[in-house]
């Protein structure tokens, strides 16, 4: 059965299958970027849990939400739930900078991805989550 990302609530497909379907459904640079970001998340944290929330948003968690992967017409937005609490020495965060909690990275068509810096940011988010869950 082909997973339909629009039918997340029916329980017929796993979150990973729904994310696969979203990537295929996009069929353009946004799908390629979402697949690339997903691979980097998995490399940075092999224990990451994929989820599908809020009627169609890919979510990655480990002892709490790490980030989301939202797709829009002009950007793929990677929002870190606790981004304001993370050090960002490479200056990756370029969106949602005014909030007290979240921070995001907008990836545009043809844009560069600093893979090592992004993986470090993902690992820092996991470390923050796991340190808070042990309290």
Image (spheres, rainbow, N blue to C red):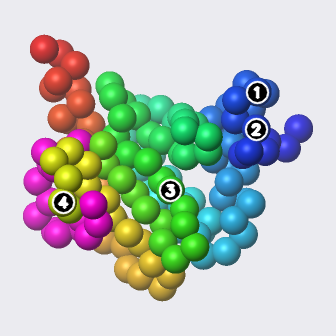
First in sequence: mark 2 or mark 4?
A: 2
Q: Residue at x 74, y 45 (%)?
A: 6
Across and down, in percent, residue 57 comes to 55, 46
**Left or right of 19 on screen, residue 97:** left
Which residues, given as a range, are shown in magenta? 82-96
Q: Which residue is mark 2?
A: 7
Task: Give the alpha-carbon distance from disc 4 to disc 3, as whole Å.
Answer: 19 Å
Q: Which residue is mark 1?
A: 10
- Residue 11 shows in this picture: yes
Is 86 placed above or below 1 here?
below
Task: Give the alpha-carbon distance from disc 2 to disc 1, as whole Å.
Answer: 6 Å
**Left or right of 65 on screen, residue 75:** right
Which residue is most to the right?
1
Task: Give the alpha-carbon distance from disc 1 to disc 4, as whole Å.
Answer: 36 Å
Q: Disc 2 vs disc 1: Cβ atoms closer than 8 Å?
A: yes
**Disc assigned to residue 98:** 4
**Disc assigned to residue 70:** 3
Q: Residues within 10 Å of mark 1 (few under 14, many from 20)?
A: few
Task: Give the alpha-carbon distance from disc 2 to disc 4, as whole Å.
Answer: 33 Å
- Residue 118 shows in this picture: no
Quarter placement of the C terminus: top left
Task: Give the alpha-carbon distance from disc 1 to disc 3, as whole Å.
Answer: 21 Å
Q: Residue at x 18, y 35 (%)?
A: 128
């Amino acid at each position: 059965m082909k997973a339909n990302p629009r039918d997340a609530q029916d329980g017929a497909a796993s979150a990973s299958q729904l994310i696969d379907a979203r990537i295929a459904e996009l069929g353009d640079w946004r799908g390629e970027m979402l697949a690339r970001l997903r691979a980097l998340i998995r490399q940075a944290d092999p224990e990451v849990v994929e989820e599908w929330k809020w009627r169609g948003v890919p979510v990655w968690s480990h002892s709490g939400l790490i980030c989301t992967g939202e797709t829009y017409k002009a950007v793929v937005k990677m929002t870190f739930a606790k981004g304001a609490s993370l050090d960002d020495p490479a200056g990756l965060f370029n969106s949602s900078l005014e909030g007290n909690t979240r921070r995001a990275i907008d990836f545009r068509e043809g844009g560069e991805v600093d893979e090592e810096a992004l993986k470090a940011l993902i690992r820092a988010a996991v470390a923050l989550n796991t340190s808070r869950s042990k309290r």
